[in-house]
Amino acid sequence: MPANKYALLRYRIIDKCLRNSQRPYPSKELLRSACDEVLYQSFGERVSPSTIEKDLYAMRFEEHLGYEAPIAFHKLRKGYYYTDPNYSLEKIPLSHEEIDAVKFAAITLGQYKELELFKQFGDAIEKILQRLDIGASVSSEEVGTI
């Protein structure tokens, strides 16, 4: 099984650990242990410390991932943290052009919201807009008309 098979899942686990206010500044070992617990439970396999190091590096610097996670190491507390306390991988970083494209698609689909076939998509469109944190800038009337 390739080492990077669970990389995206590990990134989400690491993100969750870094945002956990109950256990701030998780160590590399705690991050590794959290990944082990979710991925392998008690099957005996383990995530290596070097894998966690590579994951932290990828989350910070791999441009193709698009995360640019503001992760730093706190020397006194001997653990990792987000320098931006509001950062989360769950917030999808989009350019202005991409946001405009999503808005346009939502508005376009909104034109058909009264058709039976498209009624089921109304909630989905709202969820996407909220998830992208642009729901406030696109009113429900705007979604319904151009």
Image (cartoon, rainbow, N blue to C red):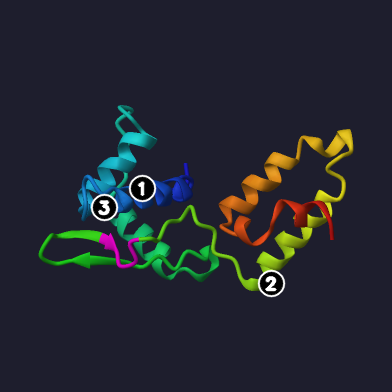
Quick one: SS at disc 2?
helix
Q: Along the horizontal axis of the image, is 138 left or right of 45?
A: right
Quick one: SS at disc 3?
helix
Which numbered disc, 2 or 3, marks the residue closer to the eye? 2
Q: Write down the residue under mark 3.
A: 49
Please say if 19 is above or below 87.
Answer: above
User: x, y (%) of residue 9?
Assistant: 45, 45
* Extent of the magenta region: 81-85
Spatial separation of the CA atoms under disc 2 and disc 3: 39 Å
Around disc 2, counting alpha carbons within 10 Å, would you say few (fewer than 14), some (14 to 19), or many (20 or more)? few
Which numbered disc, 1 or 3, marks the residue closer to the eye? 1
Quarter the C terminus occupies: bottom right
Q: Amino acid at mark 1?
A: Lys
User: x, y (%) of residue 133?
Assistant: 56, 57
Q: Write down the residue under mark 2.
A: 97
Are the two marked residues, 1 and 3, in contact with CB atoms closer than 8 angstroms? no
Is residue 11 highlighted in magenta? no
Q: Which residue is drawn at the image coordinates 38% and 60% (left, top)?
A: 86
Q: Along the horizontal axis of the image, is 146 left or right of 124?
A: right
